[in-house]
Image: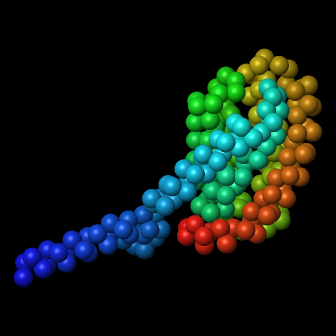
Amino acid sequence: MSDYSSKDNSKTSMEEVGKVGKANSKGKRRIIDTKTIVVLGLLVAMEIILNRFLSINAWNIKIGFSFVPIVLAAVLFGPIHAAVVGGLGDLLGAMLFPIGAYFPGFTLTAVLMGLIWGFFLHKAQTIPRILAAVGINQFILGLVVNTFWISVLYGSPYGPLFLTRIVQAVILTIVQSIVVYAIGKAAPRLSKYLMV
């Protein structure tokens, strides 16, 4: 009889272990579980590949689709997870596949961009929310802040550098708005497929 009850208890314990990360004792969803870690790891790897190998990179300009994994993390999981994908993607990418000197300001900007994507896109992907997220990321963080980091890193005057980067900001605003809208439309199916 005692053998049976110990087996029954171990079965219950294994079921509880399987539920860790899904809900706590009050029924609220925890921040992270194994599946989330795996998906975020894949998104970080995607961000590194898109950023380091499939983008147009120069010392003062970058055009590419490395924002897509961060937007996916934002839509599926929220601002904190998107910030982690952005920050880790930039940090690990700079360590593993350096393009130039590592500068922590760019990592900070990547984290802030993830927070902005998540804040605006996690609950709903309406056109005003998409335009707000893209506008803040491109014109405030990308154009104003990253231009400042580049001027500090390379010792270039801020004004002329700012002017050369306006074209990049306009192009990326259009491209990102279209791509993020498409991601928003595909998000429900993607969420079911990934079971998140």
Split into 4 quadrants, where in the image is the C terminus?
bottom right
Q: Position of residue 126 (x, y in %)?
A: 79, 68
Relative to 101, residue 128 above or below: below
Left or right, 148 with reference to 38:
right
Most foreground residue, 191 or 150: 191
Residues 114 and 6: in front is 6
On the rendered structure, is 135 left or right of 38? right
Residue 112, can we see it?
A: no
Residue 175 higher or lower than 49, as above or below: below
Which one is in front, 97 or 12?
Answer: 97
Q: Residue furthest bottom?
A: 1
Q: Is residue 24 left or right of residue 174?
A: left
Q: Residue at x 88, y 34 (%)?
A: 165
The answer, for residue 66, to whether it is visible in the render is yes
Identify the residue at image location x=91%, y=31%: 164
The type of colouring in the image is rainbow
Residue drawn at x 7%, y 78% is 2
Residue closest to the far left: 1
Image label count: 0
Q: Residue furthest top?
A: 155
Q: Position of residue 49 (x, y in %)?
A: 67, 42
Residue found at x 58% / y 41%: 88
Quadrant in the picture for residue 18? bottom left
In which quadrant will I find the N terminus?
A: bottom left
Q: Position of residue 125 (x, y in %)?
A: 75, 66
Residue 9, by quadrant, is bottom left
